[in-house]
Every structure is written in C-alpha cells, then in structure tokens.
Amino acid sequence: MKRRSVMSLLAGLSLSALMTAPALAADITVGMSWANYQEERWKIDESGLRAGLEEAGAELVTADAQSSNERQASDIDGLLARGVDVLLIVAWDSEAIIPSVERALAEGVPVIAYERQIEYPGVYYVAFDPVEVGRIQARELVRAQPKGDYVIIKGSPTDQYAHYVLTGQKEIIDPLIANGDITIVGEQWTDGWVPDNAQKNMENILTAVNDKVDAVLASNDGTAGGVVAALTSVGLEGIPVSGQDGDIAALNRIALGTQTVTAWKDARELGRLGAKVALELAKGTAPEDIEGSVVWDKGPKGTAQNASVLAPVTITHENLDVVVDADWISKEDLCAGVTENAPAACN
Amino acid sequence: MTTETLEPPSLAEPTNKRGFNVRTLSLVGLLVVIAVTFHFLSGGLFLSARNLYNLVVQTSVVAILACGMTLVIVTRNIDLSVGSVLGCVGMVIALLQIEIFPQDAAWNWPLTVAIGIGLGALIGAWHGVWIAYFGVPSFVVTLGGLLIFRGAAFEVAQGKTLAPFDPVYRLFGGGIDGALGVGPSWALFAIIMVLYGLGEVLVHRRQMRLGFDSTVRTKLLRFLAVFVVAAAFVATMNSYMKPRSDIGRGIPVPALVLLSVVLFMEFVTRFTTFGRYIFAIGGNIEAARLNGIPTRRTVLKVFIAMGVLCAIAAVVTTARLNAGTSSTGELLELSAIAAAVIGGASLSGGRGTIAGAVVGALIIQSLESGMVLIGASSSQRMVAIGLVLMVAVLADKYLSGEE
C-alpha cells in the first residue's frame, strides 16, 4: 500500500474510528516530474491536470528536470521522499529514466508515463494516440482526394513519434496504394521536424514530378507550413495538405483553404485524463480495470502496457468553431486574411 | 577605409599561367561534375531552368552565412551560433511585424528589418567582445551562443509559430512574385557588366602605372568568362515561367540579396585595409599585433559582420517560409561551416575566399537537391555530403601544395 495513505489513515483513526475507506481522494498526493516545463505546451497540460485533481480534492506536487537526466532522477527521489501516492512522469529520456521508475515501483508507488512512453512492464501509459494522428491525416486527405499522386513529408527520422504517425498514415493509404487509386510519387523525412527542411524537400519533389501532385501528407503543422510555402511558389496552393498540433498558423491556413486538416490535441484534456488515471491508481484500482484502459504494445520493444489513449480531434474547414469555442484560438487570429469561401466559424 | 593596397588577396593562392585561381576553378569543376552526374541520373531534371532557379533560392541562405563564416575562419575563429542567431532574429522580426506593430502600416516591414539587422549586429558584437577582449575561445563563446539564442528564439513567442508576413516582405523569400521579371533582369545584367568592365580597365591602368605585371589578355578572358556565365544565368532564370503563364520569373530576390552581400564582401576583403588585416591576423596574429594591426578591433568587427549576415539570412528564410518558427535555422551552422571549408577556407587561418564559399554552398545544396530528385533518403544525403566535404578538403590540400 501507499505509505502516505497508510499514515494518514492511522492519523485519521486516532481522531475518528469512523474513517474506514482505504483512501479518500482528499488524502491523495500526486507527483508530476516534468522533463522540461519551459516548453509552452506543458503549462496547458498542467492546467488540465490541476483542474482534474482539485475537483477531487487531491494535491499536486511538481518538479521540473529542465532537460537533464540527472535532475529528473533526483526530482523523482524527492517526490518519493515527499510521499506521493502516484507518480506521473514526462520522461526526458525514456531509457535513462528506468532506474528511477524501478525505485518508485519498488516502493509501491504506481507510475504513469505521461505523453512520452516509458517502455517498462507495470508502467501505465497516458497519451494522445500517435497512430490515430496519422489515421486522421490520411483519412481526411483521402476524403478530399480519393485518387491521385500523393507525397509524404514525414517527421524526424530519429523520433519514435514520427514513426507512429507514419504507421497510422500507412494503415489508411496502403490498401488504396495496393488497388491503384493512390500512387506515392515522393517521400522524405524532415530532419528535426524543421519547416525549412520540409520546404526544400517539397520544392525538389515538385521539380522531380513536374508539379504532378494531388495531395501532401505532411506529418505536423510545422512541416505543413513548409509544404504550403513550396506549393504557393508554383501556384499549387489549395491542394489537400495534412498536419497536426492545431498551431495558430495552421488553423489560419485551414480557414484560408491552403491546408485540409490538423489533428488537434487539446493538452487540457490529456491533463484531465492523467488526473483521472492517477486518482484511480492511487485508490488501488487495478490498471486493467480503469475505464477505457487498453493494452499498448506498439513500441519499439513491443512491451505490453496498460494505457489510456486519447484520440486527437479532427479539425477541418467545417468544424473550426470547435477550436474557437475551446478558447484555443481567437476568431481574429483564425480568420486573418480570410475573404472568400469563409468557414462558418468566421461568420 | 582607404584603398592603399593593390596586390590581390589571392597573392598566397596558387594561380595558373593565365592568372586564374586554381583552387576556385577546381571547385567549379567539382560543381560541374556533380551537376552533370545528377542531370543524367535524374533523367534531365537537374539542369532544367526550374531546378536551377530553386537551387539558387535554396542556396542563398547558406551562401550568405558562408561569406561571413569565411571571414571568421580566416581569423582562426569559428562561429557555431549562426543557426541559432538566425532563428532568434527571425522570431524577433516575426513578433514585431505580426503581433506588435500594426499589420497594415507601410513602415512596418522596413522598420522590423532594420531592427533585425541592428539586433544581429548587437549579438555579433556580444560574441566579438567575449572573444577579442575577454580572450575566451570562439568555439566556447559561440557554443554558448548556440544554446542562448536557440533558447531565446523559443522565449520570444513561447514556441508559437507566427504567420503571415507582410506581402512586400515576402518578396525577399523569392516566392511566386519574388523575382525581378525578364526586362529588369537583363537591365541589371547590363549595368553590372558595364560597371565590372570599367572597374577592370581602371584597375589595369593603375597597375600599369605602378609597374605591376598585368596582361590585357588575362583580364579580357576573365571578363568574357564572367559575361558568358552571367548571361547564361539570366537567360535561365528568365526561362522559368510563373505557373500557368508564359511570364518569365527572372532573377529571384534572394539571389539579389546574395549578390549584394558577395559584391560588398569581395570589395571589403580585396580593397580595404580592414580586409588586409583579417588575412594578416589569420596568418600570424602575434606578428600582426606587433605590426600595429588592431587585432582585437578587427576580430570584433568580423563578428559584427557575421551577426549582420545572420540577420540578412533570417529575413530571407522567414520571408521564404512566410512564418517565424523557433526551430528555423537549426543545424545551419554546420552547412555554413562546411560550405566555407569546401570553398577553401583553412581552419588554420589566413586563407579563404568569398567566391569559394559561395561555390561551396552551391556544392552542398546541389548534393541535397540532386539526391531528392533521384529519390534518395535524408540519411543517404548525409553520407554523401560528409564524404564530399572530406574529399574536397583533401583535394584542396594537394592543390595548394601543402605537406
């Protein structure tokens, strides 16, 4: 059992013998070890996480490793010493973190790998489904352009995430390639996900195929920006292009009609899911009994883990109001420069 | 700055009997070999007007940086921060132009460009002071700069992507309207050729008067070579049409920016005392100091120049992408150093040319583009560029007769 809840139970017993529940949410302390809190998105995750925990009356303590393996290891030691009941980790390095994970599990503290997978048996995994991101991109592109010549602008070759996205894209388009509807006329990885690299690759592919391109599967909104710039310089802007993240610039492109889809990941939702799973595990619920729990074994090592994955939201020209209503983007930013064929969200 | 020296800076450079720089010529030879090889492998795509136009635009950013990097390397220093400085200045320009200043104001983009260039100079001076006055090795200072300014690029807008830029500003990126057009391209060609011809005549007359060995034949041959190459370049750029039309594009704006940078830098290195100081310091800094050369101030100025060039490159990059992103320019320092080194800049200092750096940048980008045209992967490209870097430096070593 968890040290702290046992202690608080004892304390509770000395005050009142009526306290019999194993651990009320109000007694739970949740630890979060950030890899690098400086990155903008984690503040958004934290707002969701904190909201989810506060509603249940649980306490959140956090530490920021500032991009250092050593600091993350000592952060986790510190959180364990504080007696957290459950530990969420955004791993800076998913291999180097394993000794710390082992320590936590040995103390009986459940560990949740948050957004970044830690492939270790017994670790719960909470993330946006990266394979679904790829499926969303391919599905919307195929809807807009069922047949023709496709280009794939992949993410960084050294990032496991980029491989997951590609897996999802392939799931949708491989059957269409097999039956001859779709032809892949060019594909390139984008070193470091840098938009400038995506732009150069796209320009050179356009030269290679003499502009005979009908749709571009770009793996995120940054690379999509590079692709659209390359298409614009040859007057091809407007053909279907995919993305992910819901970048302000990308949502504006969707409103303008130069990008087709973005797989939007509302980090607040993931934070809330993290809070829910953390509370369940702290209360002693078996991982496989958590609502919505699945078995995830798509990592490079193929380790089977219990996981809760969140499907990203498909955002296209038709449902841009979703991101406005969620206060993700202002109407002014979304609709900048939009004149003809304005989406409903801009009216 | 006075023009008190007349010996060409390539005095220490091996020249053939016609007075051409052997090293630069051999680089051009390598470029031709690469181009022709890819032309055949890609089924005639590489030397098409369209690919050459793209190649020029894609090369311009690395070439601008490589010009500055050459000066830095000549003074026996290195600058690892250029990619990060480019990213940071680009983000500041984007933030000011898109979020802070009114978007429709006519003064918006010129002011943001001016602020960006000022910021570039300031960052360069910051590095230069640490290196020249505090005596911290440039490798360490600019490694710090690489981290500081990449971090700063993120902080400027908390990692957000900022878009879109002013339509006029976007012309710097050479997009669909970012070229001179057919008529103005030829006009520019004519003006430059006349000025170049006049310049050669003036230099020739002065050299004769001062008793230098100068032959008309060599100069005429060189003029003709430049004339033919430049005319072919303009004709090629003019023959790449805008989409769905028969309007020729002409010289892309990024190429004009690069041309201005190259002409200015060539002038500085060849005809100013500052230029001579740079080479003197690289040859032997102690001797240079004992001869009364202000070594510290010269190194400081070199880094300021590098910072300004980073800012100019930032303008071209962000205008081209039509967005400011915090990852812009990542790993560009490696391309810039590789271009300068392939172009003949010696890491032991004292040697390097602006023209060589530009050809070096063209070689790297030709390999990058050519391999995408034939469908090679990014990992295969890395292998190829790494090999060419090593072979080019080895060949250079033999050509220069070093042991």
Image (tube, grey):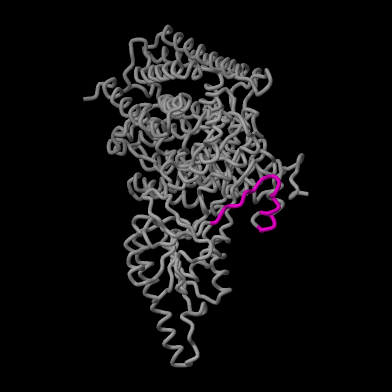
- The residue positioned 44% from the left and 29% from the top of the image is B368
- Residue B90's spot in the image, x, y percent? 54, 43
Residue B14 shows in this picture: yes
Nearer the observer, B354 or B320: B320
Considering only vertical position in the picture, is B157 above or below B384? below
In magenta, the rendered stretch is A310-327
Assess whether residue B25 is covered by the magenta stretch. Answer: no
Residue A345, x across and y down, in percent: 74, 50
x then y, percent, for residue B222:
45, 12
Q: Quadrant of residue B277?
A: top left
Q: Residue at x 41, y 27 (%)?
A: B360
Residue B308 is left or right of residue A248, and the answer is left
Q: Nearer the viewer, residue B4 or A169?
A: A169
B213 relative position to A130: left or right: left
B113 lies left or right of B375: right
Question: For the image shown, how many numbered marks are present on the structure?
Answer: 0
Image position, residue B63 (x, y; %):
46, 30
Q: Quadrant of the N terminus of chain A?
A: bottom left
Vertical order, A100 against B302 (above or below): below
Task: Give the quarter of the image for residue B189.
Answer: top right
Q: Identify the residue at the far right of this view.
A: A347
Q: Residue at x 38, y 26 (%)?
A: B343
Give A65 or B172, whichever is nearer the viewer. Answer: A65
Residue B271 in view of the camera: no
Q: Residue at x 50, y 14 (%)?
A: B229
Q: Is residue A315 magenta?
A: yes
In the foreground, B113 or A196: A196
